[in-house]
Image (cartoon, rainbow, N blue to C red):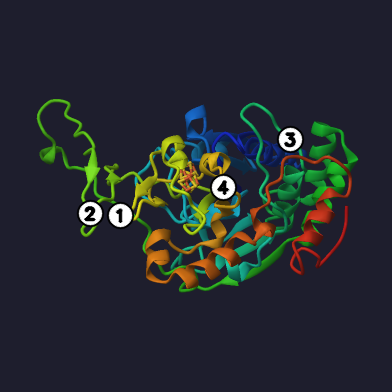
């Protein structure tokens, strides 16, 4: 029998986390006399910060089964797909393919999408695309675990995910094997306890074929060979994009096909009333995201924003730019257009949106025992359903 798991993570920031999980699955499988392999895709270079990448684990009863399975490029019918950041529910676009793919695209019919999140399944389903077949959504309570380029700040997310996988798909690995593998690999009884409790905490919900986000994921057609120009010709991006009615405004030309919304975990929310039009965000944004509106305001264009947070850091006006978790948004529409249409309604929306610190918070490591339980408690009723370590 074959068992496959794919872990989708944010390139670089969660690289080690993805590796720990898939390696842990193979080590747990070995405790049961199985054979297996863990390998990565798309996430090996620093410039891919935040870009969705994947790590796979394949566990088999025999070497022959494993060899047959690995003769294809990558597993396409996974028992479990893991998202270690819930903003990935909106879909993933790596540098290696074109357009947005539903997060569960490679999950087999009836398989499980396991998400680490402080949000209830119903909220995540607003982002997860319809699959056309039945599947299962599983939520492991926890905030997204991010770290730096070469560091790994351990907050037990790796072993919690392993414990949850053992609960959801025991035909791949059993909890006792996960516990034994953790003891062998990390020699840490606290991690063993975290894995065990994760199995108790994970919540599941069956999802029907027509449930979920009805949006058709963004896609575009590549040029056919007969449409290409002779020689190697790459058209330059125009300096300026003309926007009807934007006399006095300026929108830089951008790549019409490469969108960055799958890279983003947070986005800036701009208070146009307190903005002094100082230009600093426009100058400092590394992705030239800001459109200059005819009124001289700076509107962060959500097709171009990668969510780095530089604009929030450099804006000299207190709370004029606030980074907010992607989960708070359902589209990529212009904030300035909403402000222009109804400033009072925009202000009310802004006030409400930037307040949501529970899902904005990021984990930067496990600093003391009990921290995870505190985080769950701070997140409200969903997180306080059970208390533990
Ligand atoms: S977060 Fe701000 S600075 Fe960073 S890409 Fe987006 S608009 Fe630009
Ligand atoms: S940095 Fe802040 S105050 Fe300056 S233009 Fe940008 S949003 Fe306005």
Provide the secondary structure element on which disc 1 rests.
loop
Residue underneath mark 1 = 294
Q: Are marks 3 and 4 in contact (CB under 8 Å)?
A: no
Question: Picture coordinates of residue 61 (x, y %)?
Answer: 65, 43
For the residues bearing labels 2 and 3, Cβ distance under 8 angstroms:
no
How far is the residue under mark 4 from the one under mark 2? 27 Å
Residue depth check, mark 3 versus mark 4: number of the one nearer the observer = 4
Q: CA distance from mark 3 to mark 4?
A: 32 Å
> Element under label 3?
loop
Q: CA distance from mark 4 to mark 1?
A: 21 Å
Q: From this viewpoint, is residue 179 visible?
A: yes
From what the image shows, is residue 358 above or below residue 49? below
Where residue 227 appears, as percent x and y from the top left, is 12, 41
The crowd level at tag 4 (other Cα within 10 Å; few <14, some 14-19, many 20+) is few
- Residue 59: x and y in percent read 63, 42
Kindly identify which residue carries mark 3: 153
Relative to residue 88, is residue 328 depicted above or below? Answer: below
Nearer to the camera, 112 or 329: 329
* Residue at the spot of label 4: 317
Q: Earlier in the sequence, mark 4 or mark 1?
A: 1
Of callouts 4 and 2, which one flags the residue occurring earlier in the amino acid sequence? 2
The residue identified by callout 2 is: 247
In the image: residue 232, left or right of residue 199: left
């Amino acid at each position: 029998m074959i068992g496959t798991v794919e872990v989708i993570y944010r390139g670089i920031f969660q690289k080690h986390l993805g590796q720990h999980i898939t390696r842990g699955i193979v080590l747990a499988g070995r405790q049961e006399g199985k054979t297996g392999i863990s390998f990565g895709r798309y996430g090996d270079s620093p410039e891919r910060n935040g870009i969705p990448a994947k790590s796979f684990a394949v566990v088999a009863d025999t070497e022959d089964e494993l060899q047959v399975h690995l003769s294809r490029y990558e597993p396409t019918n996974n028992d479990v797909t893991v998202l270690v950041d819930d903003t990935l529910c909106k879909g993933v676009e790596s540098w290696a393919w074109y357009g947005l793919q539903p997060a569960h695209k490679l999950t087999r019919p009836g398989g499980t999408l396991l998400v680490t999140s402080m949000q209830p399944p119903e909220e995540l389903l607003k982002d997860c695309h319809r699959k056309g077949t039945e599947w299962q959504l599983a939520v492991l309570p926890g905030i997204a675990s991010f770290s730096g380029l070469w560091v790994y700040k351990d907050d037990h997310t790796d072993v919690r995910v392993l414990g949850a996988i053992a609960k959801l798909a025991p035909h791949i690995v059993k909890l006792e094997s996960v516990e034994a593998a953790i003891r062998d690999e990390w020699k840490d009884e606290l991690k063993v306890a975290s894995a065990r409790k994760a199995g108790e905490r994970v919540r599941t919900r069956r999802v029907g074929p027509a449930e979920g986000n009805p949006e058709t994921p963004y896609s575009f057609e590549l040029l056919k060979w007969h449409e290409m120009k002779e020689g190697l010709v790459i058209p330059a991006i125009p300096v300026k994009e003309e926007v009807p009615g934007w006399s006095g405004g300026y929108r830089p030309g951008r790549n019409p096909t490469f969108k960055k919304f799958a890279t983003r975990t947070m986005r800036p929310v701009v208070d146009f009333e307190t903005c002094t039009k100082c230009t600093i965000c426009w100058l400092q944004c590394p992705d030239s995201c800001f459109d200059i509106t005819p009124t001289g305001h700076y509107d962060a264009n959500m097709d171009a924003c990668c969510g780095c947070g530089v604009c929030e850091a450099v804006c000299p006006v207190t709370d004029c730019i606030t980074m907010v978790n992607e989960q708070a948004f359902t589209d990529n529409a212009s904030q300035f257009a909403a402000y222009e249409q109804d400033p009072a309604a925009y202000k009310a929306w802004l006030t409400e949106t930037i307040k949501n610190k529970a899902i904005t918070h990021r984990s930067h490591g496990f600093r003391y025992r009990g921290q995870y339980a505190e985080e769950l408690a701070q997140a409200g009723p969903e997180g306080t359903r059970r208390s533990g370590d």
